[in-house]
Image (tube, rainbow, N blue to C red):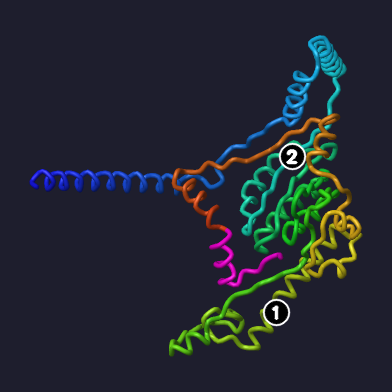
Amino acid sequence: MEFFSEYAGFLARTVTLVVAILVILAAFAALRSRHRSKGAGHLDVSKLNDFYKGLRERLEQSVLDKDRLKAARKAEAKAAKQAKKSGEHKPRVFVLDFDGDLRASAVENLRHEVTALLTMATPQDEVVLRLESGGGMVHGYGLAASQLVRIRQAGVPLTVCVDKVAASGGYMMACIGEKILSAPFAILGSIGVVAQLPNVHRLLKKHDIDFEVLTAGEYKRTLTVFGENTEKGREKFQEDLETTHELFKNFVARYRPQLAIDEIATGEIWLGQAALGKQLVDELKTSDEYLAERARDAELFQLHFVEKKSLQERVGLAASVVLDRVVLTWWSRLNQQRFWQ
């Protein structure tokens, strides 16, 4: 019995020491991350031509016999040597990826990628954005769209490829492209605005629970979760939604003047084949097909900004990915965030 008592005491002291060390390390990490400059990270650049070349060479090694393979390699080396000797300069294509969530959090990397490519890109080059997003918060996608506007303003051709979905805020980004390519069954459109939130006022009233909402400013709070909503508040909330929708429509019409904006800005969605008929896209083609074609006569560079994150941030990010769809949707609606949906 005495042994177990001593062992329990030893175990308690050990656990206490370990917890204390972890607390100190966590505090130190938090202090370092607080003083680290925001946006610190690096830009990864990979040449997609090498990727496509590797695929082709691997297949050739399996399919061609030794003599044919040797002849193909020899002809390829000769062509490369002649191109280098002639001083031939191929056009450049800068490839970006945007995988959008509700917050459009990928804009934090997009802004740095756009800044980087604009230091070199010219009107003779091209930017290709592979875009996937079903929309989200107005301000987040507004900022993401503004980053793409920078490319257009610099006079650099912008092509947007949609393989799965570019709806709502996603289409707001896509419409900035001078050319929009879509897979046949990709989802596009949803040019509308929605906001919704629960109201438990009657439940609270049933249990004799009061909830006070104090504001300074007539429309500081229009609809609430716990308070009693008024018809005047509903009208103002609807008015704000209509105003946001009108801004959305005008933005799309500015970059896609060929659209019958009042006919397609109903919140409806269309698959790629139908979207082509509505002029929401310019051509049915996957991003793989388009980039493989461009790789034949241009140099393709894929850009990806990688932000440095502490251990705490990485753990937090992993947790947020798991809970993002459930918690963020509830929380955003609770706080009356408006969504491009």
What residue does disc 2 label? 95
Return the disc, 2 or 1, that comes first in the chain's sequence: 2
Residue 288 coordinates in the image, percent (x, y): 78, 39
Q: On the rendered structure, is 2 left or right of 147?
A: left
Viewport quadrant of the C terminus: bottom right
Q: Nearer the viewer, residue 240 or 70?
A: 70
Picture residue at 75% right of the left edge, 38% below the top: 94
Is residue 159 toward the left or the right of residue 1 in the image? right
Badge 2 density bin: few <14, some 14–19, many ≥20, Cα 10 Å: many
Q: CA distance from mark 2 to mark 1?
A: 40 Å
Q: Secondary structure at mark 1?
A: helix
**Horizontal and vertical percent position of residue 129:** 75, 45
Task: Report the magenta residues as a range.
Answer: 325-341
- In the rendered structure, which amino acid carries the disc numbered 2? Val
In this rendering, the answer to whether 205 lies above or below 173 is below
Q: Nearer the viewer, residue 322 or 133?
A: 322
Look at label 1 and name its amino acid.
Gln
Q: Is residue 292 above or below residue 67?
A: below
Q: How many marks?
A: 2
Which residue is the site of mark 1?
238
Q: Residue at x 89, y 57 (%)?
A: 279
Residue 220: quarter of image: bottom right
Q: What residue is shown at x 78% (from left), y 56% (from top)? A: 187
Image point (60%, 84%), residue name: 218
Q: Where is residue 338? Give x, y as percent.
A: 65, 69
Location of residue 239 (image quadrant): bottom right
